[in-house]
Amino acid sequence: MFSFQGFIDLPLVWYALIATAVFLYVLLDGFDLGLGILFPFAPSEKCQDRMMTSIAPFWDGNETWLVMGGGGLFAAFPLAYAILMPAFYIPIILMLLGLILRGVSFEFRFKAHDRSKKRWGYVFHLGSLVATMTQGMILGAFVQGISVTGRSFSGGPFDWLNAFSVMTGVALVAGYALLGATWLIMKTEDVTQAWARKCTGYLFWHVAFFMGLVSLCMPIMDPRIRELWFSLPHFAYLGIMPISCIILFWLLWRDLRHQNEYRPFFLIQGIFLMNYIGIGISTWPWLVPYQVTFSQAAAAPESQSLLLVGAVIMLPVVLAYTGYCYWLFRGKSSHESAY
Amino acid sequence: MILHLDPALLARLQFAFTISFHILFPAFTIGLASWLAVVEWRWLKTGDETYRDVYQMWVKIFAVTFGMGVVSGVVLSYQFGTNWSVFSDKVGNVLGPLLGFEVLTAFFLEASFLGIMLFGWNRVSPKMHFAATVTVASGTLVSAFWILSANSWMQTPQGFMIGDDGLYYPTNWLAIIFNSSFPYRMVHMVVAAYLTTAFAVSGVGAFYLFRKKFTRQAKVMFAMAMLMAVFVAPLQLLFGDLHGLNTFKEQPVKVAAMEGLWETQKGAPLVLFGWPDEGLETTRFAIEIPKISSLILTHSLDGEVRGLKEWPADRRPPVAPVFWSFRIMVGVGMMMILTGVFAVFLYWKKRLFDSPWFLRWCMAMTPAGFVAVLSGWFVTEIGRQPYIVFNSLLTAESISPVAGIHVGLSLVAFMIIYGLVFGAGIYYIVRLVAKGPVPEADTPYGGHGITKPPIVSDAVKASGGDHV
């Protein structure tokens, strides 16, 4: 039996690893869920085919990061997993059902014709929408805190449902849709691309509005967060985040007018990163907000050590072949034989 | 309507339902991925387009089943937390890393290379494509390795200690991963997956041969599947027996339930059929062969086999489902072996591909593997009850603090959505089978924008462009 506990802060390393896995999930599945949200509004069936083709080789790998996040939480922080999952019982079940419907509609839509093809397109949209909405609501409920007694969740089944979590749900729908639209600008041409640009211009304002709203609500709702962000000297260096967010939004606005194809997608990712770090700072060091810290929830050092060996060897390999797949299917998605 | 919404019972029902649904897909895709790798290798080796036609038909079926397997698997990885949070908290230290390793070593591998398998035809060289197929096939096996390791640990837990806080702590990882029932379970399950695929493929091949369609491709499917039936189905009997002996040593109460044996006795009979009655604590209307159970389990006619009455009633698994599932599994296995015997006989008579009764028989055997896999899982999982971790943690003490109504409603939702998904999946698979191994020269793959490599259109020209 071995343990690295004497050499490194294992819970901290695992906190960082899982936070990274969840963020990668948000970025990667974010754009393909967003594409699903925009799907029925596409100008033609041909456009929809292009959209589907642009993510078909990737969606499965993208979704794996969600399993990595959930499985990693179970492995590295079983106590947090055991408290959070029952707390979000209903939205998690709804999210899973949404992901099921959306996952199978890829395969089924490819094999269907005419009317049923259209139907699977709507199923794809509905599944994506439900999955995104519930993820956003889970996030909103998470930052508000969770009732815990002993080692388990002790709140009610609808604790997760309130005005703030509905708002974060809608905000995430807009955010993912914007990620999806900028992905389409990068991966498509002509009609689809022009339409995606229009979507981006429209969603841009929604996302900016919601991000401002959430940033306002969180310190107002919770004195701990207010204290953290608005006291000196925190204010000085934490201020970098909102300021860089504003700069990224400005660059995005400029790119949309100058027809840049690749940068918008990466600018949005930058905006997501800033917000993600912001939420991380606000909830630090809680893994179950205001109840259990990440070091209290940590699995036995032996368990975290064993899995760390696996992660250190496998994660670079996973990233390498994920990168290889994205490189292999680079270029514009097409309806015709461009591939 | 279940009036008394018992969350423990509903959580068990929900898990049983979602995992039974899920396991059908891995059982099929583990075998199918390996078989596709062999088919593609034959194509690269011989240049015979028949193999490529077969590959391209089955890879689409693979995609549909793999997709359903992935989405139903994601559900399971979250269900440990939603329905079994106390279990997750207690054994997280031990099982967490095993499941984590599955994601790290297998999940990503399969998901990423599946994209190349399906859409990479003219983006990579045929050799690289073959490498992708082999990678996906290995991924499915690695996945099975970790899942079965975790499952086996719950059956035969070792290499751990229970702390003062009631949590399980690992003391020996090798003992946990390679626990005593794991090797048997791994071999038995992977071979079961191969047989499941073989019988599904032979059923389709038999259907084409019967209808005299796609004969060239059908012979490849049928012959390869029959090779599995001839050589592997009897081997499975041996592996199953070894697994049974291990269970007899580690979980004698499960074996007693499988055998429907209530009294401990020397020279125990083999109960062929009967009606286990838990109220009367006896197996009624039993048809028995004297002393054979002792012979199988102890390799001696007078060996002692412990009966169910050795354990208190609340420490026994439900007898009837275990008893019946076991008989179904063994019965289907025997029919598989019989199929192999028929195949050898017909091959010798040079009638393997054209005796209508045998083709009909093989068509009827198409779902055989699925039935056997499911009933085998029922034996092993129901047989572990009332424990979730055998002899250590009770199932009833492992559930989440959630109300029965929520578990019940989500069970209903899963049943509806899974019914829809499964129905549609079956429908599209049947349509792919009906269409057959027709190379689509100029239409993009599945009609969605990714064309086949130029070699496909050459193949169509070579064969006159008409396969129907």
Image: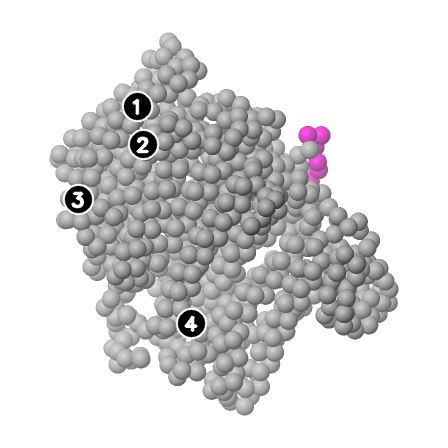
Instruction: Check disc 2 and report the residue beneath it.
Output: A171
Q: Relative to B385, is B127 above or below?
A: below
Q: CA distance from mark 3 to mark 1?
A: 27 Å
Q: Which residues are magenta?
A: B158-165
In the rendered structure, which disc, 3 or 1, sits on the residue that comes first in sequence? Answer: 3
The answer as to whether the residues below labels 3 and 4 share one chain is: no
Q: Residue at x 29, y 27 (%)?
A: A210
In front of the other: A51 or B177: A51
In front of the other: A279 or B370: B370
| Cβ atoms at labels 2 and 4 below 8 Å apart | no
Q: CA distance from mark 2 to mark 4?
A: 52 Å
Which amino acid does the dot numbered 4 rest on? Arg
- Which disc number belongs to residue A195? 3
Could one spot residue A320 in this view of the protein? no
- Which disc number belongs to residue B42? 4
Instruction: Check disc 1 and report the residue beneath it.
Output: A213
Q: Residue at x 43, y 70 (%)?
A: B39
Q: Residue at x 55, y 70 (%)?
A: B368
The number of callouts visible is 4
In front of the other: B275 or A150: B275
